[in-house]
Image (cartoon, coloured by chain):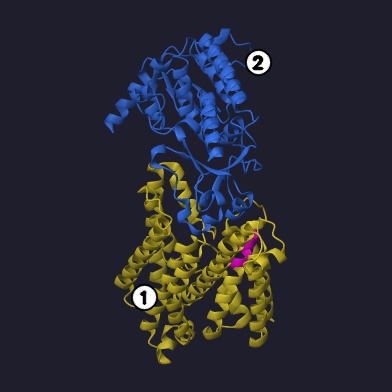
Amino acid sequence: MRPVRAGRFAAGLGALLVLALAAGVLAGPAFLRPGEVLGALLGRGDPAAIAIVWSLRLPRAALGLLVGGVLAVSGASLQVLVRNPLADPYLLGLSGGAGLGAVLAIAAGVASPWALPAAAFCGALLAMAAVYRLAVVAGGALDGRVLVLAGVVVGSFAGALVGGILSVTEAQGARSAMLWLMGGLGGAGWVAVAALAAYSLPALAVLFAEARGLDLLALGEEPAQHLGADVARTKRRVYVAASLLAAAAVAAAGIVGFVGLVVPHAVRMMRGHDHRGLLPAAFAAGGALLVLADAAARTAFAPVELPVGVVTALIGVPVFAFLLRRWTARSSS
Amino acid sequence: MARVRSFARRLLNSPVPVVALVACAGQAPAGDAARVDDWGRTLALAAPARRIVSLSPSTTEIVFALGLGGRLVGRTTWCDYPAAARAVPDVGNGMEPNVEAVAARRPDLVLLYASPANRPAADRLASLGIAVAGLTLDRAVDVRRAARLIGALAGASRAADSLVAAFDSSLSAARAFAAPGAAGPRLRLYVHVWADPPVTVGRGSYLDEILRFAGADNVFGDLAASSATVSLESVVSRDPDGIVVLAGDTSAGPPDLSARAAWRAVRAVREGRYLVLDGSLYGRPSPRVPLAVRDLSGRLLRLAAR
């Protein structure tokens, strides 16, 4: 499949993003007419509608945009770093670490709304540090294969601890911790949006700045070295920034599968491998996918809410299969 | 290893109490000592049960209410009522119980919740020659059937009959007390189970039933499931009059839902209209159903007046 022309691609992506955000604000289990939503946006009309739009739908759409974007950028970078198309933001032990943190907080009986996300974030950071340490000790200069193995090992260890804790603590709270961890944007508030935005901007900036380094790294380490890239520095920066992004996304919305794995591939197929274009496009596409999926998760079986990860996969897999078919058909002809 | 083997031998050689587990296919049960449990299995004890292990807080309450508390030789960690239950040895969890810990109590009757997950444990206990009754205790009405079966297996049918009669009359009295009349419209309540994601209960739950008995409605009573994850937006748009919370310790006060920005969109949260209910009384069907209904109707009147 020939990469789509940059201008047309950007316009399409922009339209998708606008459509997703509109769906995020217009759709929901409380049936508000578009006119009511517009009025509420301007602060007019029924106070209940204003509360629904301003304190529920808007922060949810904003958080979905950020989390989806951050996951896609993190996944795109990690796939290059570990040279593995199956890499996703949680691969390097992060989901296990976050789960352990969340379950420990519940087991310790901490009830504040900030406790779960904070504990999950700390758990993810601990796992990240452990993986980094293992990879440095074993592989010297952050070998991609060693990173993946260290991630799997640390993740399994954390998973075993979670299993052990769950079986000896009271079931209800621990089950709810797992429920939270399964991911969703239900707890979104403006403070969470602001915290994630403030936190992820520097990490995103680091990755965008390393776009050229990622291009070279994608060619392989030796060619990258010959072309004058400081491979070790790029790898270190990409690893830390991508993992910090994923940890922050976990703290904001639990573990949302699929976005960080497949959106980068889909964008690569359409847009090519140039990371200066790819990373921002992945951010927009990931954000749009998550906001759309969340709107569907809220409305499909309202008032019951589906886990958003279920919907991201249900929407994403057919799209991805379609792209994959076109891509393989074109590249083999 | 030797210790394990000697334990196994002791277990096998133990004079299995006077129990004969008989499957009577189609055969009329002899006397009232033969009954069918909620798995549809026919239980026949050669003699009334003397050593009972109760693997759910509901059955523990029923055993005590039948005046058979003295025959309990094992209970779950969660059996907290009546106070005397605390003195009974704890055999751990009631869901997927520890078979060895239960068998070590040498029971002649084990009562457990009839869930698919409990079936393997029930079969293993039965293979040790112990009578096992699976009981589904999900709704108020289940208390009557469970009391009758336990009474029959323990030779206390008379006590069971009078327990059921008292249960019926006090439940209808409690419901009559709660019947809406001059009290105004029925209160619509949201049951808070978990905040993020919002988990509540539906029509299939025991708490939903108790709310209705006491003259209130569950705002998610249209959901058939016993529990469900719902979107916060639908909680806002259903605008409950109050938030019901079950707590192990009611003195701890209501959960701080208003600390979560999104929850403040719910009027009842902003206005702090909580009903904190004792989990032991409201969390499970038991002979105390009428008490729960009466207690709740009083609280509803106070909430409506607030």
Question: Which amino acid type corresponds to the residue marked 1 in the rendered image?
Answer: Leu
Front residue of B277/B50: it is B277
Q: Which residue matches tag 1? A: A142
The yellow chain is A
Compared with residue A34, is residue A218 higher up or lower down, i.e. above or below? below
Question: Which amino acid type corresponds to the residue marked 2 in the rendered image?
Answer: Gly
Q: What residue appears at the point 36 percent right and 18 percent down from the top-left corner?
A: B13
Specify whether B255 is left or right of A300.
left
Q: What residue appears at the point 34 percent right and 63 percent down from the top-left corner?
A: A126
Q: Is residue A292 magenta?
A: yes
The blue chain is B
Residue A167 coordinates in the image, percent (x, y): 40, 43
Can residue A318 be seen? Answer: no
Front residue of B179/A34: it is B179
Residue B128 coordinates in the image, percent (x, y): 44, 23
Placement of the N terminus of chain B among the 4 image quadrants: top left
Mark 1: few/some/many CA within 10 Å (<14, 14-19, 20+): many
- Chain bearing tag 1 is A
Q: Which residue matches tag 2? A: B26
Residue B290 coordinates in the image, percent (x, y): 54, 24
Residue extending farthest left = B2
Front residue of B12/B170: it is B170
Q: Which residues are magenta?
A: A290-297
Q: What residue appears at the point 60 percent right and 77 percent down from the top-left corner?
A: A267
Q: What's the distance in space between the residues labelled 2 and 1, CA to CA? A: 71 Å
